[in-house]
Image: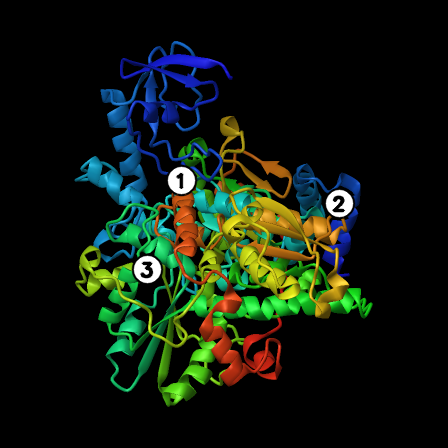
Amino acid sequence: MSKMINLTINNMPVSVEEGTTILEAAKKLSISIPTLCYHEDLCVAGNCRVCVVELVGMRTLQASCAVPARDNMQILTNSMKVRQARRHIIELLLSEHNADCTKCYKNGNCELQELSNEYRIGNRLFADLVTEKNYTIDQSSPSIMKDDSKCIRCQRCVRTCSELQAVSALAVSGKGNHMKISSFYDHPMHEVVCTNCGQCINRCPTGALIERNYIDEVWEAIYNPNKHVVVQTAPAVRVALGEELGYDPGERVTGKMVAALRRLGFDSVLDTDFTADLTIMEEGTELLTRLKKALVDGDTSVSLPMFTSCSPGWIKFIEHMFPELLPNLSTCKSPQQMFGTLAKTYYAQRKNIDPKDMVSISIMPCTAKKFESVRPEMRDSGFQDVDYVLTTRELAIMIKQAGINFMQLEDDKYDRFMGDSSGAAVIFGATGGVMEAALRTAYELVTGREVPFANLNITPVRGMEGVKEASIKIENVKADWSFLEGAELKVAIAHGLTNAKKLMTAIRDGKASYHFVEVMACPGGCLGGGGQPIPTSPEIRKKRTEAIYAEDEGLPIRKSHENPEVAAIYADFLSEPLGHKSHELLHTHYKARKRY
Amino acid sequence: MSNSEILVKELADKYGRNRESLMPILQDVIEVRRYVTDEVLVSVAKELDLSAAEVFGTASFYSFIDTKEVGKYVIRLCKTIVCDMKGKDAIIGALESTLRIKVGQTTPDKKFTLFTTNCLGWCHKGPAMLINDEVYTELTPGKAIEIIENYMHK
């Protein structure tokens, strides 16, 4: 056990482990100290100073997020000196901040606004510098908007992009009063290495980084009587939406979400999980085909390991950072895009609707999906396959706008026909989920038996470790798959692009060998996505993860290949996995992009 | 390989490819080129396996690393309080009218760029200015014009 430190905070004694900061020690006594630059997921910066406290005997105030507790410290978190300093710090931040709060997208969910409210900042002591600052707003990206007039230079975004994502599309430039957060040479966000993952948005304490929202466009589509509007919902949305609408983290609100979507006026409420199951069929078959080509046919041109391709942040990352590994990427489109193209082909034909009269909306935990939907590769239906992508947060806004009392709603069910799904599809929302879903199906396809894990729960691929490895021995295979007899299928899983970078570097340099690799751009997988409710913390990610696996266990069908609608679409429309029609509609290729 | 790539590669060979090598490389680029461009910074980022935004961020922090094109002679007139009190504004006026540019601009012949800068440490002999690495002190408008005229004929 590590050494314990004894100190007092506001004259109350507290004992904490060595290395604990004053801020964390105060939490133990239920004392809140305001913070802005501090974030649980990131390294300490100590630059906003709003968390200052008085250390008795010390002339200057100390940033409680950065100073470790020491024996016999006497800390005051609420002395006159502290209150005054904090007040001035907030006022100084506001003097350079475009505080037009009522017209701000983050109105009501802004840490600076909350603090200003808490301290009842009124008439300003300091001059308003906003008009002299020549701030710029960057709206070039289809995913992310950057408004420097709202930025308080806390650098959470910079640390996020560097520490969690290993991208560093944003950095600090200039100095003194010219210091700002900027991309390379301040180029538009759309032109730099940004993966659109939105993790910076999720951590921005103000409205400086927000998603490009398409709420008005979606309302317009709903109100247009000539448009048939379909909506799909990603697996991770159902375990997080509740947080925006009155529930504690970890509440599953699938039924209520479906009911709310119906009340909003969508013509058909469908589930991305259906195409997640379809992805497993296509991707699983693709993996087995690649293995067969490599092992039986001795085809050396086959790229192994194969990488999953569901996460659009990851796709753009590999395009920029590891273009030489692009052939390893599964050719499967993401479930969102498979859904989009099938909505305007399969669904449209069955329902007798002209696809040009359709508007296809998706609700995603993700901001990179907005970029993905406008990719030129994603028009195989003859139209833009997915018209608008809303984040979990945007859906919550619409539900509030519509005056729906979410917590009072009766649970409803998805429409039939592209609305059915398995538990395997639900777990796509958690890191390791795609791998687990694929193994459940592939193993059974090859051996005729269920995966050898209690209750189908492949626990080695679950959890929050940055890079996970697992292997599964394949024995007593069916005749068709005799080449796999006795083989050990080696898999790896990474979440967060920093972990992805580590894994890719090892693979590229030949230091690690696998057959199948799952990568999700966001920490924890989609449930920790850039489009999820703010805040997202390690604790909240854990709760959402538990909810995802509970949702899986609660479903009658747990394996993608047992989804009856998946069987139906192959019988009626696609004929077979990796067949001609699948290739045309469900698969694609990506291109290398400049790294800088 | 472009000239910038060759230059940066040579410098990376000389100083190494660790993050600590970033500053010496940038300083040497400035020595040769007077300013850095996006092309040079991308080459540095590639050589050192850093993000381009980080390299730009570092370069933009330093007053003596210009991230935009500058003229052959860069004039940096001290704007800090002592030089200000000793008549820096009159010197700016003289320089601007002689060079026919404003502070922050470069002459069309790319010979002069005029900047103001923070304290040069010559407070006791202000107003002071630098032209490239040469320092000029106790300036008067007449003296400043004379110095510039000498450079014009260089």
Alpha-carbon span between mark 1 and mark 3: 21 Å
Q: In which quadrant of the rendered view does residue A232 lie?
A: bottom left
> Nearest the camera: A146 or A118?
A118
Q: Residues within 10 Å of mark 1 (few under 14, many from 20)?
A: few
Q: Which residue is mark 2?
A: B12
* SS under mark 2: helix
Q: Pointer 1: what residue?
A: A539
Say which mark, if any, is on residue A254.
Answer: 3
Amino acid type, label 1: Glu
Q: Which residue type carries mark 2?
A: Ala
For the question of whether residue A538 can be seen, the reply is yes
| Disc 3 residue type (three-letter) | Thr
Indicate which disc residue A378 carries.
none
| Distance of label 2 from label 3 (alpha carbons) | 56 Å
> Which label's residue is closer to the chain start, 1 or 3?
3
Residue A223 falls in image quadrant = bottom left
Residue at position x 45%, y 47% in the image: A157
Circles 1 and 2: CB distance less than 8 Å? Answer: no
Observer-side mark, 1 or 2, equals 1
Instruction: Please identify the quadrant where the C terminus of chain A is shown.
Output: bottom right
Q: Are marks 1 and 3 in contact (CB under 8 Å)?
A: no
Please report the residue visible at 37 percent of the width from the left and 52 percent of the height from the top.
A208
**Chain hosting mark 3:** A
Which residue is at 77% across, 61% downward?
A: B1
Q: CA distance from mark 1 to mark 2?
A: 44 Å
Q: Chain of mark 2?
A: B
